[in-house]
Amino acid sequence: MHKITLIPGDGIGPEVVKPALDIIKTAGVKIAWDSHLAGTEALKKHGTTIPRALMDSFDKTKVALKGPVTTPVGEGFSSVNVELRQTFTLYANLRPIKNLPGVKARYQNVDLVVVRENTEGLYSGIEHEVVPGVMESLKIITEKASTRIAKFAFEYARKNGRKKVTAVHKANIMKLTDGLFLDCARKMAQKYKRIAFSDIIVDNACMQLVLDPLQFDILLLENLYGDIVSDLAAGLVGGLGLVAGANLGEHHALFEPVHGSAPDIKGKGIANPSAMISAAIMMLHHIGERAAANRIDAALEKVLWRGDCVTRDLGGTATTKRFAEAIIKEIER
Ligand code: NAI
């Protein structure tokens, strides 16, 4: 029996987490879930956005499955996601971007992986008011974190038969910070002669991705560019409802959909559970439940390919519940 920390999140979080849990159960994987509130819900009940019990649970289980959590814009508490990533040094954010069968998208045969540095950059949260009317936010880039994420990208390429790593930066303007990031990537590339390396300025990278995403294999980015470019990349293959990500550290791993809490569709029962289910599939691979992961993957792909039981964002009319039931039926077949 696996013990795993569960963070259902808020907004559409609980709506997409429930089907993922039902599907894992149907696939026969026995998991004792240790469920915890985070964000606004936790603040209301426990007076803090990340309760101690959640931290302790994740520290112990080392694996977490997480739904999206709302972060207020402007004022209010800081991001639960950023805090979890920094506290547990979940330094690598891995987001595979691939077309799914039957899903209409702007491009076909896209198969790229976004590797995002997850702990520093402009997400370091060091902001202050210099004088009234002037705010300052510090972008922290360290040799240690840049080397660590570059190594992760090349190792991922080596282990997964990938051919090329492209570092995305703005070192022409941010010569010291992005310059260091790029320098670390270049140095790491020297150690992996069989994997091609190139670099590209982030604005050009966005245009190139929209023109021809098939030219990319692994994209290596610092935190902010990684956040933005991975949403852009999700759009290339059909949208945010489909793409999942892993937040990986030396000891801990947290799996979640790329999308947020989608307040505009909260409570309507129409959220696409695919990204959450894909996050669960990544988690099952991580804990060694490969057969179950592959069965769920095949069932999800079949239902998407048939297209008669999918949610509105994919052009269907099904509710989240019906979509999930169709996947469960496929697994039970
Ligand atoms: P969002 O990803 O929640 O929504 C963007 C658009 O995509 C909306 O139109 C939404 O309806 C749609 N969408 C997202 N997921 C969907 C799904 N599963 N099925 C169908 N449609 C879906 O991004 P937004 O609105 O910028 O952020 C809302 C909140 O979520 C914010 O507080 C933000 O901070 C938080 N957020 C949390 C994340 C996390 O917990 N990892 C990641 C991204 C945002």
Image (cartoon, rainbow, N blue to C red):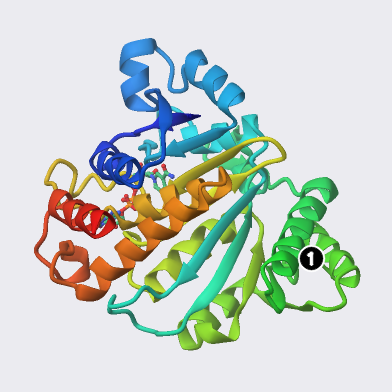
Q: Is residue 10 above or below residue 261?
A: above
Residue at 31% over, 16% down: 44
Question: Image quadrant of residue 195?
Answer: bottom right
Residue at label 1?
Answer: 182
* Percent of width and height locating residue 315: 16, 71
Q: Residue furthest top?
A: 46
How many numbered discs sit on the rendered protein? 1
* Percent of width and height locating residue 131: 60, 34
Give the left or right position of residue 285, taking residue 261 as reference: right
Indicate the amino acid at tag 1: Leu
Does label 1 point to a residue whose CB lies under 8 Å from ligand 1? no
* Percent of width and height locating residue 193: 87, 77
Give the left or right position of residue 167, taking residue 74 as reference: right
Give the left or right position of residue 195, taking residue 266 as reference: right
Say which quadrant the C terminus sits in. Answer: bottom left
Question: Image quadrant of residue 42?
Answer: top left
| Numbered disc 1: secondary structure | helix
Residue at 32% over, 45% down: 20
- Using the image as rendered, state which of residue 29 and residue 277 is in the foreground: 29
- Using the image as rendered, state which of residue 325 and residue 163 is in the foreground: 325
Q: Is residue 219 visible?
A: yes
Crowding around mark 1 (Cα neighbors within 10 Å: few <14, some 14 to 19, many 20+) is: many
Q: Residue furthest front?
A: 333
- Using the image as rendered, state which of residue 204 and residue 50 is in the foreground: 50
Question: Image quadrant of residue 31?
Answer: top left
Q: Is residue 257 visible?
A: no
Residue at 65% over, 62% down: 221
